Amino acid sequence: MTEMVKQMGFVFNIDLCIGCKACEIACRNENQTVSAVKWRKVSKLTDDTYLSISCNHCSSPECFRVCPENAFTKRGDGIVQINSNLCTGCGLCISACPFSAPQYDPELHKVSKCQMCYPRQDKGFLPACIEACSTGAIDMENLDSFCSREAVSTIPGFPNSRLTDPSIVFYPAKKRKRYFLN
Amino acid sequence: MERCLYVPDYLHHLLEGLEKGLQGICDKLANLLSFPVIAIDPLYNLLSSSNPENNILVEYLDDIKIEESNIYKCHLTFNNDSLQGIGSAIIVDGKLRGYLIISCGEISDDKLLQLNSIISYASLLCSLELRKKFQIKQERQHFKEAFIYDLLYGNIKKKDEIISYGQFWGWDFNLPHTVIVFSLRDFEYYSEDQHFIGILFYAIEKSLIERNLKPIAMKKRGEVIVVFPLHESEQVKKRAEVNTFVQHIINQVDKANLSSRIITGVGRACANPEMIFRSYQEAKVAFELGQLLDITTPFFNDLGLERILFKHDLQDLKEFYFHILGDIEENDSLHGGELMRTLENFSANQYDLTKTADAMFLHRNTLRYRIKKIEEILDKKLDDMNVKLNITAALKIRQLRKF
């Protein structure tokens, strides 16, 4: 049975992300996913800002609700897992998720998704994406106790999150200053 | 100078009372002051009384403390007679956890200031007693919460396992259960709202115990989740059972000025305890949509088209809305008319002229004129079923505040 209830989530700083896709590559390398399966995706928000998202381990996951096989579970630390033995690859979770986090694996005919590298976390390591990010744009916090005045729950370009309550917070892009040398 | 280390006898008496908990403190204080003493929670429910057979109720508590003291004035009722009383707040860890009330009738300010010290001391003892109780309860709740969490997120896949774990806490998972989510409108995590969620949780637990139910409830950030057992077999009665419970909670928290902020959501009833997680997710969907649609107690079962529209692509919904009702909106903004409001009411009253005219306090002919005008603008007949369907869907999109 679950021992301690908390909600781990990603903290993403828009200003620090340079769109290098190191997180995306580290994720694929760590989890050995096939080319069609992208648990973490980096997309361009504006000309000079990027967004890197994966499964947000929502507080009210829609994938969870619609799965006819009850293949999803949520660990005590808030990580939403999918049991591939139970998954039939029906794809209902893919269409239900506003973030397109569950990915269909055409080779296994099953759905898989980011599991926040819980095997690494259980050994005391950070998830691969966080460790690979050279600018520190992605981080991880217990959102039940996380408090920051500057952090916001959503940003323009992020899908509507009201229904699922995703476990991610953002540091939005700040207005940049220009300095001149005399 | 020699320090005086003498401890008055009455403090000894009160401390002796602490051995018997709140009851002991009330008894000893009542003996000392020769007035009935009661302890109540923040929602004015009786915790303990020096005369349990005399049912004294607290009606109203003045918000303002009496100057230079920690005492509040209050109005009490006893056998339908109105009485005056004084009370002191019981504070645990900076949070209000109840009041200690003395039914002393009218009292002079001098006498009141004399009593201030002893009442404050007694309420401090009550705080110690309540703190002890909370600590024991929190320890028990810790184990319960771990199980309820697993139940709400489908982490226990075997029905027998859930039933046997449930028996440990006296919960019968052979009965059908439904999940009810309670929260506060505009909840702010880092504010006083956390304390209010505590009060809500307390009111829910108390109400369940009053119904002879062992509470299956937990707090989770800004919400209180209740797994509610349904004893009735008929659908209508089940619904009434849930409605009565929710209404009772709203009435209970009214004393803490929370009733206008309470929002709820109710999932579907599930006979299989493995499926309780689904009921929880449904309750959360109902909870979100209920806020947008202004439904006091939204049941997931009642939500139809809204469920699909809420999740649909925003751009597509916008296009659909303006395609169906864009002309009416434009006409209203140009001429300041009320055609959109009329159409909303017409749709809400099942496109029935008489019902709509009554609801809008309009003459039937005025309404008929407006409907004709709407038909002209839309270039469609409102008695066509497909037109009605499109308009209803467009109005629901508007209601869901999609733009």
Image (spheres, rainbow, N blue to C red):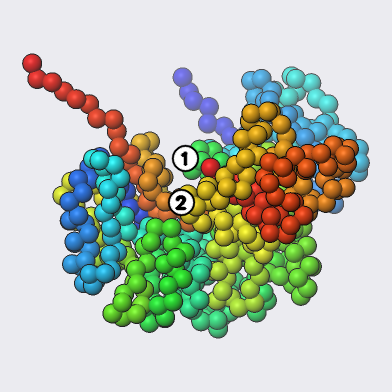
**Other-residue count near label 1 (Cα within 10 Å), few / some / many at <14 / 14–19 / ≥20:** few
- Residue at image mark 1: B190
Label 2: few (<14), some or many (≥20) within 10 Å?
Answer: some
User: Can you tell which mark lies on residue B270?
Assistant: none
| Residue B47 in view | no
Which chain does the numbered disc 1 sit on?
Answer: B
The one nearer the camera, A168 or B217, is A168
- The residue at the far right in this view is B80
Left or right, B176 with respect to A47, comes to right
- Residue B356 visible to the viewer: yes
- B237 shown above or below B258: below
Quarter of image, res B124:
top right
Picture quadrant of residue B243:
bottom right
Q: Find residue A149 and report its horizontal and vertical position in percent.
A: 38, 36
| Left or right of A140 on screen, residue B340 | right
Residue type at tag 1: Tyr
Marks 2/1: CA–CA distance: 21 Å
Query: Which amino acid, by three-letter code, is at mark 2?
Result: Ser
Name the residue tied to disc 2. A161
* For residue A115, side relative to residue B225 (left or right): left
Name the subunit of mark 2: A
Q: Is B142 placed left or right of B334 in the picture?
A: left
Q: Is residue A53 above or below residue B121?
A: below
State the image coordinates of residue B50 (x, y, percent, origin top left).
Answer: 77, 46
Name the residue at 52% across, 48% down.
Answer: B319
Q: What residue appears at the point 54 percent right and 69 percent down from the top-left corner?
A: B277
Considering the numbered disc 2 on the image, is that residue within a helix, a strand or a loop? loop
Question: At which x and y percent is residue B241?
Answer: 76, 63
Residue in front for this viewpoint, A66 or B246: A66
Residue plotted at (17% across, 56% down): A22
Q: How many marks?
A: 2
Secondary structure found at label 1: loop
